Amino acid sequence: MSEEPQIPVDPDDETEIPESHPRHESLLARHRIEAGVEKGITSLQGLIAQGRGETYDYLLGERTIESADAAARAAAAEFLLADHPVISVNGNVAALSPDAVVDLAQATDADIEVNLFNRTEERMAAIAEHLREHGASEVKGLAADGRIPGLDHARATVDADGIHAADVVLVPLEDGDRAAALDAMGKTEIVIDLNPLSRSAQVADIPIVDNLVRVLPLIAEHARDLRDASREELETIVQGFDREAALDAAERVIRSGASE
Ligand code: PTJ
């Protein structure tokens, strides 16, 4: 018999996925992505990205591994040290975790900017509106008066006073090109990607190998925990984070199922 879950009849009713289902969280995420496509927020390619992510998440045991927690803490420290941190949001992130994006922005005083690979004015507006419905006071990305050099697709289009001017950028779920281009601009880049071998994770200053659904709230939690820390303490946390070791640890877990 197939284990394939029943697709909920009403896309706005998440309760149709029984909480007792062993893969409840994963089914909820699929449902949100599906609803995101229906609302014009998520691109069709976003469905493929979700499937790729699920595969790695399954191999990681659908949990936050220790090295990802350390990366999330280092990311929180970077946010608190930054003059101008920005959280970049695409169609998958907006569909999966709009509340967590808004909460993290509040916890770290960061800007939120929509930045899309498959950019259309309709999707930009729909995502900005969706984030506002979830409590965002300001959403950047619509001015589109800046460019990331060295990129020849829509993701190069940014706000001059947003990603272009940022010193720290969080990119949850990415394709590798922009990650490298932001790196070349000298920005500190925090990447959330379930695949430790992806180019985005490989070029990030802080790669967080975890599901964005789990780790966005965790970064906010660390940020609140570190709110009163001195610059020196924050810098010590950042310097103590070893990106190579974190990527290796994630790869080991994926290859062997080891606990780390
Ligand atoms: O909304 P747009 O137009 O900007 O579209 C963006 C897409 C989804 C098309 C773009 O980001 C894309 O093509 O992504 P890729 O190249 O498929 O890469 C997605 C990466 O994100 C893969 O390495 C996945 O493992 C990872 N991933 C997918 N879901 C999650 C994730 N990482 C963390 N959390 C997730 N929930």
Image (cartoon, rainbow, N blue to C red):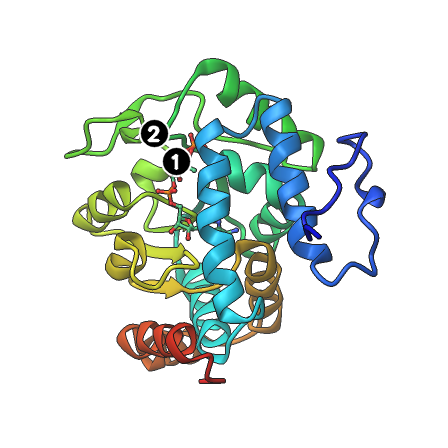
* Residue pointed to by mark 2: 158
Q: Is residue 123 among what the camera can see? A: yes
- Give residue 217's position: percent from left, percent from top: 62, 59
Split into quadrants, the picture shows ligand 1 in the one at top left
Q: Residues within 10 Å of mark 2 (few under 14, many from 20)?
A: many
* Residue pointed to by mark 1: 162
Quarter of the image holding residue 148? top left
Q: Are marks 1 and 2 in contact (CB under 8 Å)?
A: yes
Q: How many numbered discs, if any?
A: 2
In this rendering, the answer to whether 94 lies above or below 125 is below
Secondary structure, mark 2, is: strand
In this rendering, the answer to whether 19 lies above or below 117 is below
- Give residue 102's position: percent from left, percent from top: 62, 45
Residue type (three-letter) at the residue carrying disc 2: Val
Quarter of the image holding residue 175? top left
Residue nearest the observer in this picture, 133 or 19: 19
Measured Cα–Cα span from mark 1 to mark 2: 7 Å
- Give residue 62's position: percent from left, percent from top: 58, 66
- Asked if residue 48 lies left or right of residue 227, the reply is left
- Give residue 41's position: percent from left, percent from top: 56, 27
